[in-house]
Image: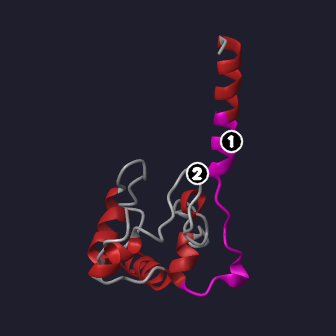
């Protein structure tokens, strides 16, 4: 493959990656809990989980779906992940207080319920 063609392919992939980064915010009239409002950037402008994980937590090209991750975590592990920011995820320590963490964890747990150990073995 020529250098020019490689450059075009990389530009296309970069463009697709940037376009896929933007998650969709859940409309305010469809939000049913304080945690969901927080996740969707409707409470604090510096907390915009939806941008990477989509407004419903199903993920984007930038951030994974939480459907496979949240069920495997304890509530304490969810709080730690939000506070510490594993991998490329930013840390939200200092941006969320205990009440915010509780609301966000409750929404995530309701959206993606904890599974039993037998169910977890089927996840990659």
In the picture, the disc for residue 61 is 2
Task: Identify the residue at image location x=35%, y=54%.
Answer: 86
Residue 120 painted magenta:
no
Task: Identify the residue at image location x=72%, y=83%.
Answer: 29
Compare marks 2 and 1 and give the one earlier in the sequence.
1
Task: Identify the residue at image location x=37%, y=56%.
Answer: 85
Mark 1 residue element = helix
- Looking at the rendering, which quadrant does residue 23 occupy? bottom right
Residue 96 placed where, x, y %? Answer: 41, 68
Q: Which residues are magenta?
A: 13-33
Labels 2 and 1 touching (C-beta < 8 A): yes
Is 73 situated above or below 5? below
Residue 55 placed where, x, y %? Answer: 61, 69
- Looking at the rendering, which quadrant does residue 54 occupy? bottom right
- The residue carrying mark 1 is 16
Task: Identify the residue at image location x=35%, y=79%.
Answer: 119
26 or 8: which is nearer to us? 8
- Give the side of residue 121 with respect to residue 67, left or right: left
Distance from label 2 to label 1 (Cα)? 9 Å
């Amino acid at each position: 493959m020529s250098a020019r063609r490689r450059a075009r392919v990389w530009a296309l992939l970069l463009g697709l990656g940037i376009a896929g980064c933007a998650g969709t915010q859940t409309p305010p009239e469809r939000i049913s809990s304080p945690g969901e409002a927080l996740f969707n950037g409707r409470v604090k402008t510096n907390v915009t989980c939806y941008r990477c994980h989509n407004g419903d937590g199903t993920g984007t090209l930038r951030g994974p779906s939480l459907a496979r991750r949240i069920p495997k975590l304890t509530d304490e592990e969810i709080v730690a992940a939000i506070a510490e920011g594993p991998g490329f995820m930013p840390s939200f320590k200092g941006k969320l207080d205990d009440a915010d963490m509780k609301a966000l964890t409750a929404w995530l747990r309701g959206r993606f319920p904890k599974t039993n150990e037998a169910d977890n073995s089927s996840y990659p």
